[in-house]
Image (tube, grey):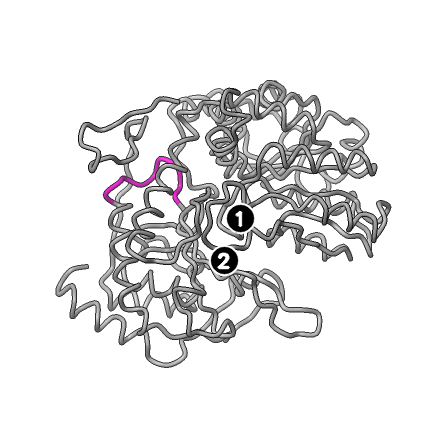
């Protein structure tokens, strides 16, 4: 990876290794309009209309900028229902990148999770993972299974210098398998880049240790590779034993030790769609029948063929260090600037985006008033910035109906790849700093419409009191007629 230093060290910033050739016009409503829009959206950033958002930092899923080669590849798509050359080209790339022989297509990552749950999870089963993801957990519990999180204690420390906070607690994994019995563990899931605790990576060493435990106990080792791109960058730059390895070699070493790999190409590969891949034909046959049932025929699985062509190119580009470095570098720049100002950030910077520790940001707010959700609303009011709550709102209630409080209350400011300019990142940092200085004005939220499953996607809330109007009035006092 090229190192580019600035002559004046105080001017050092991340340098993009690409140029922008297509642009999309943005708009920024007034602060008064933003208060109105967020309430029309039920104080849920998922329900905001994109036309009312200036910086969409909700997610990096399906919103990354594709390369010129990806766009060009889409024009050669073969839309044959069966025997598609597009499918053949994608399978060839999967073989080159991961070394896998078998491929099942799906329309995105959660569709892959559904297939895995249908094929392998039965009532009473336990699925260990370093940390859960919302849809993964929902699919497993829907089938009568349960999820046990086995991340190391360091993973939940908001600020540290631990480079791999996503690592599995290996002794705890071995103990769990001994206690419940290998027959009740259908698979162990590794999430390479832990979504809900700040995009924190695992070391390659830790992944291989998990795989070894699985092999010893006759349990499937499953890798969720949706966030693997950033994790590869962190392995390359943070893991001493891997610094002289190429990204291609790191990828192959990891994949060769997994029984199954699945991913959403809305993240990995910067396209649309998903895939389950393996070198174990028996496992593929066990899942194969669910693809036509839930997704589509075996050559496309619910994906549009042009997206499959873009995926193939995007996966090859994932092996390019100059491609995968840009996201983590922008995220680190934003995190460092906010941390230097005193904003409580998750450290070290991970993948996906910059993560604000809302529990510390709003330390006097009880979790029952959803501090991460409230902070996400405040950031939209302050700057038209749409972040994502990753805390208690993203959990689901316990079986007895009580609120399940999250271990962490985070607001994720995702940095879609090659989408924002550095001036926009600076704007985001400025508005976060202003909200931090006025955090005493922020109040809580309460449910008014609460779905029973995946409530954070489309549930609606209301502010407790008139804190939003007070925040908007302070904005006008400080910024005058500025948007």
Q: Secondary structure at mark 1?
A: helix
In this rendering, position of residue 128 left or right of residue 446: right
Name the disc covering residue 262, or none. none
Residue located 61% across and 23% down the image: 252
Can residue 301 be spotted in the picture? no
In this rendering, position of residue 363 left or right of residue 308: left
Q: Which residue is mark 2?
A: 390
Magenta span: chief secondary structure: loop
Marks 1/2: CA distance? 9 Å
Residue located 19% across and 27% down the image: 7
Residue nearest the viewer, comparing 78 with 256: 256
Task: Return the x and y of residue 1 as percentages of the image width and height.
Answer: 40, 22
Residues at circles 1 and 2 in contact by the CB criterion of under 8 Å = yes
Residue nearest the viewer, comparing 308 with 16: 16
Residue nearest the viewer, comparing 229 with 136: 229
In this rendering, position of residue 474 left or right of residue 255: left
Q: Secondary structure at mark 2?
A: strand
N-terminal-most mark, 1 or 2: 1
Residue range of the region highlighted in magenta in the rendering: 415-423
Residue located 58% across and 22% down the image: 97
Q: Is residue 14 above or below residue 449?
A: above
Task: Return the x and y of residue 53 as percentages of the image width and height.
Answer: 32, 54
| Quarter of the view holding residue 327 | top left
Name the disc covering residue 195, or none. 1
Q: Does the magenta run of residues contain 442?
A: no
Task: Return the x and y of residue 227 as percentages of the image width and height.
Answer: 53, 39
Query: In which quadrant will I find the C terminus?
Result: bottom left
């Amino acid at each position: 990876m090229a190192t580019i230093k600035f002559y004046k060290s105080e001017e050092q910033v991340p340098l993009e290794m690409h140029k922008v050739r297509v642009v999309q016009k943005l708009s920024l409503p007034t602060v008064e309009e933003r208060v109105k829009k967020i309430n029309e959206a039920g104080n849920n950033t998922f329900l905001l209309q994109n036309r009312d958002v200036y910086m969409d930092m909700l997610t990096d899923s399906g919103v990354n900028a594709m390369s010129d080669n990806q766009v060009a590849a889409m024009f050669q798509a073969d839309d044959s229902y069966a025997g598609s050359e597009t499918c053949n080209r994608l399978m060839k790339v999967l073989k080159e990148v991961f070394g896998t022989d078998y491929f099942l297509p799906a329309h995105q990552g959660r569709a892959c999770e559904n297939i895995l749950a249908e094929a392998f999870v039965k009532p009473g089963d336990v699925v260990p993972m370093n940390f859960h993801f919302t849809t993964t957990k929902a699919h497993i519990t829907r089938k009568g299974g349960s999820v046990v999180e086995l991340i190391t204690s360091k993973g939940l420390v908001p600020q540290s210098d631990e480079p791999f906070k996503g690592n599995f607690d290996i002794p705890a994994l071995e103990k769990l398998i001994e206690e419940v019995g290998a027959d009740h563990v259908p698979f162990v899931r590794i999430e390479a880049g832990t979504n809900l605790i700040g995009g924190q990576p695992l070391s390659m060493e830790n992944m291989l240790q998990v795989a070894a435990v699985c092999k010893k106990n006759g349990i499937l080792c499953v890798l969720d590779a949706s966030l693997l791109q950033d994790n590869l960058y962190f392995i390359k730059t943070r893991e001493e034993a891997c610094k002289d390895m190429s990204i291609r070699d790191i990828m192959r070493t990891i994949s060769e030790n997994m029984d199954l790999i699945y991913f959403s190409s809305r993240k990995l590969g910067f396209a649309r769609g998903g895939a389950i891949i393996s070198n174990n034909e028996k496992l593929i046959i066990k899942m194969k029948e669910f693809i036509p049932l839930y997704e589509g025929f075996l050559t496309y699985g619910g994906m549009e063929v042009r997206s499959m062509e873009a995926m193939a190119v995007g996966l090859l580009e994932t092996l390019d260090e100059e491609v995968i470095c840009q996201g983590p570098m922008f995220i680190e720049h934003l995190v460092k600037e906010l941390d230097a100002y005193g904003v409580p950030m998750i450290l070290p910077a991970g993948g996906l985006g910059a993560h604000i520790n809302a529990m510390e940001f709003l330390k006097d707010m009880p979790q029952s008033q959803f501090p991460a959700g409230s902070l996400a609303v405040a950031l939209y009011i302050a700057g038209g910035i749409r972040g994502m709550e990753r805390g208690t709102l993203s959990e689901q209630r316990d079986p007895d109906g009580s609120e399940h409080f999250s271990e962490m209350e985070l607001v994720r400011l995702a940095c879609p790849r090659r989408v924002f300019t550095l001036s926009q990142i600076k704007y985001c940092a400025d508005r976060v700093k202003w909200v931090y200085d006025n955090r005493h004005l922020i109040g809580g939220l309460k449910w008014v419409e609460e779905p029973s499953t995946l409530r954070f996607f489309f549930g609606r809330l209301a502010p407790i009191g008139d804190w939003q109007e007070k925040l908007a009035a302070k904005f006008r006092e400080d910024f005058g007629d500025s948007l």
